[in-house]
Structures are given as C-alpha cells and as structure tokens.
Image (cartoon, grey):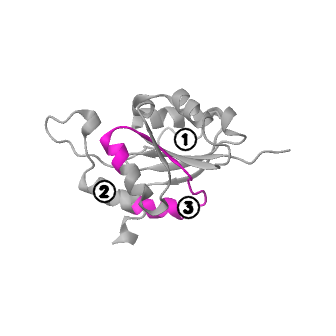
Amino acid sequence: MKSESKFVWLIRHGKSAWPAGTPDMERPLSQRGRRDGTIMAEVLATSEHIPQQFYTSDSERTRHTTELLNDVLKLPITSTHDLYTGSHREVEKLLRRTEKSLSCVAIVSHLPTIESCIRATNEWPEEHAFPTLATVCYELGGEWEVVEFTHAKLRQFFIPRMFRDAST
C-alpha cells in the first residue's frame, strides 16, 4: 500500500519594523509586512496544496504573519520557540509529530531556520534569494513520521511582489 505524499510550506515572516530599543523577539511587522501578509493569505488559500495547520515561531513578527495568513483559512496554529533559530533537524522533528490525517502544513519562521530547510532539500538554486514572506512548497513523500528534507521536491514558489499589482 503506497502512502500519499505530504506537503510543507516554508514561509519567511513578513517585513518587520525596527523600533529603537525593541528586542528582536518583539519586533512587529512593518506596514509592508502587514500588506504582504494579506496578499499572501489569498495566494495560500487558493494554491494547489492548501495547508491544514500552521506551525510558527514565537516571535512577534512570525505570530502576526501567521495570523494574517490564517485570516482566510482559519486553521489551528502551534507556536514554538524551536522555530526561532532552529535548524532543519528541529523542523523535521516537529513535522514528524504532525497528525497523520493531515497532508499539508505550513511553517512560518525566520531566515536561518527556513534557509536550513531549503539547503537540506538540494532543490534551491544558490543564486535565488528568499525575501520576506516568500513561500515555497515542498513535497516530502511518505508519512510524517519519516520525513526528511533531503528527499523533498520543490513544487511551488511565490513571493509577494508577484501579486502586489493585482491587489491594488
């Protein structure tokens, strides 16, 4: 019996503001970050692989980004500090605990964590940047309990500027 593939969206948080004296964990989204979050919520909700759950870092900007993305989908959200600076290994551990009935989840995190996951896939051209609110979907194959980014296949990639003109 062949198991169905699993899909994961890796999403970098929206553009953040830099208020003087604000610790990194408490930095809010900028106006552009909030606008792009609203745009990308519609993109995610109409994509080929729609997430069924969000996992997010516990920083202010990732939690707010997740709330904006979830405004349309209304999904369960799990917040964890492991996604603040974790590597792809921490993300794999998190994914391995995902409910079996789910076929697609979204991870909203920061560039060190997202970059670690992407590099582990070997499915990302080195010359491409991963700007704020970039979203990439990977097919992981198999069951959640055994997922590894080294076996992932790139399926979709979106960045906010691809959709900004359409939303104005």
Decide which of 99, 63 is in the foreground and name it: 99
Is residue 122 something one can see in this rendering? no
Q: Residues within 10 Å of mark 2 (few under 14, many from 20)?
A: many
Decide which of 95, 32 is in the foreground and name it: 95
Q: Would you say 168 lies left or right of 140 here?
A: left
- Rendered residue at 54%/65% (across/down): 46
- Rendered residue at 60%/35% (across/down): 97
| Disc 1 element | loop
Q: Which mark is residue 124?
A: 1
Per the image, is 50 magenta? yes
Q: Quadrant of the N terminus?
A: top right
- The residue stretch that appears in magenta: 39-64
Q: Which amino acid type is marked by label 1?
A: Trp
Is residue 93 something one can see in this rendering? yes
Q: Would you say 79 lies left or right of 101 here?
A: left
| Disc 2 element | helix
**Above or below, comparing residue 38 to residue 20 in the picture:** below
Between disc 2 and disc 1, the foreground one is 2
| Disc 3 element | loop
Q: Which amino acid type is marked by label 3?
A: Ser
User: Could you give the CA–CA distance between mark 2 and mark 1, rounded to whole angstroms?
Assistant: 27 Å
User: Could you give the CA–CA distance between mark 2 and mark 3, rounded to whole angstroms?
Assistant: 20 Å
Looking at this view, name the residue that lies furthest to the left.
Answer: 20
x then y, percent, for residue 124: 55, 41
Q: Which amino acid type is marked by label 2?
A: Arg
Residue of label 2: 34
Give the mark nearest the N terminus, 3 or 1: 3
Residue of label 3: 47
